Image (cartoon, helix red, strand yellow):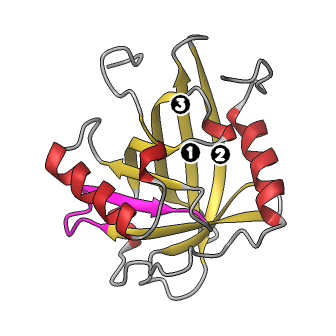
Amino acid sequence: MKSAWRPRSMATLAAVAATGTLLIGCTGIPDGTEPVTGFELERYLGEWYEIARLDHSFEEGLDCVTATYSLRDDGGVKVINRGYNLEEQAWDEAEGRAYFIDDESVGRLKVSFFGPFYGGYNVLELDDDYQWALVAGPNRDYLWILARTPTLEGDVEQRLRQRAAELDFPTDELIDVVQDQTCPGR
């Protein structure tokens, strides 16, 4: 059952989530997982479609979700997360920034949508051609399957779900994100 109260903007939701995760060491990586190596930021930049996710408050009720990454003047990454609430017929958008935690050839960054509060962004699996990715937050409560296109071949998605299960993520709780003609502009 969904809560009757829902903040109006993704930015507000991200701020609330960022504040809460700050208290638990939010730039971490889930125990027993490793970020990809040989990571090339230039190839990762651009638009990604959310295929599936573990649901959380700052994306609750959103479909048609995309994440767009571009370079910032300070060497970081500009992050634009955008999702559409099909029920309310309204877009929510949040702008953030991300920076590498360690070596730039390792897919491990910290991302912030609210002031000095950062959360972990850990690329755990990545296609050789940068067409899909499995991304985790600082713990097993946050997981995303991303793709360069609104759909992902079933066998690829199944392999990513299986890999996430092997890493002890609660894959039975993954929700499929609508990315079809009901999304405005498609």
Where 100 sits versus 64, above or below? below
Where 20 sits versus 85, above or below? below
| Membership of 129 in magenta stretch | yes
What residue is shown with label 3? 83
Q: Which mark is residue 80?
A: 1
Give the magenta part as a residue range: 126-137
> Disc 1 or disc 3, which is closer to the eye?
3
Image location of residue 180, percent across then percent down: 31, 22
Q: Which mark is residue 7?
A: none
Disc on the earlier residue, 2 or 3: 3
Image quarter of residue 159: bottom left
- Residue at (66%, 23%) from the top-left corner? 1
Q: Residues within 10 Å of mark 2 (few under 14, many from 20)?
A: some
Image location of residue 136, percent across then percent down: 51, 63
Mark 2 lies on a secondary structure that is: strand
Instruction: Give whichever of 185, 62 is nearer the camera.
Output: 62
Separation of residues labelled 2 and 3 (CA atoms): 12 Å
Disc on the earlier residue, 2 or 1: 1
The residue under label 3 is which amino acid type?
Answer: Gly
Separation of residues labelled 1 and 3 (CA atoms): 10 Å
Image location of residue 50, percent across then percent down: 41, 42
The residue under label 2 is which amino acid type?
Answer: Glu
Separation of residues labelled 2 and 1 (CA atoms): 5 Å
